[in-house]
Image (spheres, rainbow, N blue to C red):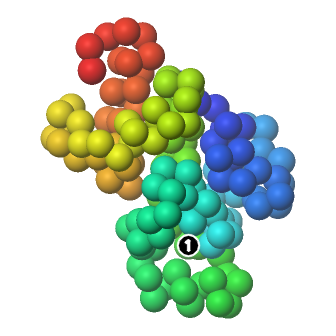
Amino acid sequence: MVNAISTAEMLGGKEVLGTKVQSDRDLEKVVLKGLPTNVVPEVVKKIYPGQTDKIYQLVPRSTFIRRQRAGSLLNVEESQKAERLARVYSFAVEVWDSEEKAREFMIKSHPMLENRTPFDASLGELGARQVEEVLGRLMFGIGA
């Protein structure tokens, strides 16, 4: 299972988060404080290169643009979505040992997710848990 350090790296690391994350509690503090808006396009770009419209599934367009212009942080709910997506994608990279294969997994509908994509499922906490369960099964060679 992915740790807080790899999730933080997926979010941009110390340069973006402003602090070095070494534990789940460190990551939780950063998320509760609010992540920088530039985290969202960076995470989305790793999964959907060139499809910036996916950003707005995490944060509504007008809200994202307003926050970006003001240089303000994401709210807690938006930060949690970005963290979940980074955590799940990080786990997919670990399972597949390839960003390309992880990306393919994230954008294809999956029968164990009621034919949702892992990207879409990961926007909610319960869906992210389901995706992590599928990834865990894949990691340990159990049918998924």
**Quarter of the image that includes the N terminus:** top right
Q: Is residue 32 visible?
A: no
Q: Residues within 10 Å of mark 1 (few under 14, many from 20)?
A: some
Residue 51: x and y in percent read 44, 65
Residue 141: x and y in percent read 37, 9
Q: Is residue 33 visible?
A: yes
The residue positioned 41% from the left and 21% from the top of the image is: 136
The residue positioned 46% from the left and 55% from the top of the image is: 48
**Quarter of the image that includes the C terminus:** top left
Residue bearing the label numbered 1: 75
Q: Is residue 115 left or right of residue 63?
A: left
Q: Secondary structure at mark 1?
A: loop
The residue positioned 54% from the left and 86% from the top of the image is: 65
Q: Looking at the image, is 31 positioned above or below residue 99?
A: below
Q: Looking at the image, is 93 positioned above or below residue 108?
A: above
Q: Is residue 123 left or right of residue 83?
A: left
Furthest toward the top, the residue is 141
Number of numbered callouts drawn = 1
Q: Looking at the image, is 122 positioned above or below residue 38?
A: above
Q: Amino acid at mark 1?
A: Asn
Residue 44: x and y in percent read 51, 58
Q: Is residue 69 left or right of residue 95?
A: right
The residue positioned 16% from the left and 41% from the top of the image is: 114
| Front residue of 49 and 31 | 49
Q: Quadrant of residue 97?
A: top right
Residue 66: x and y in percent read 56, 90
| Front residue of 68 and 133 | 68
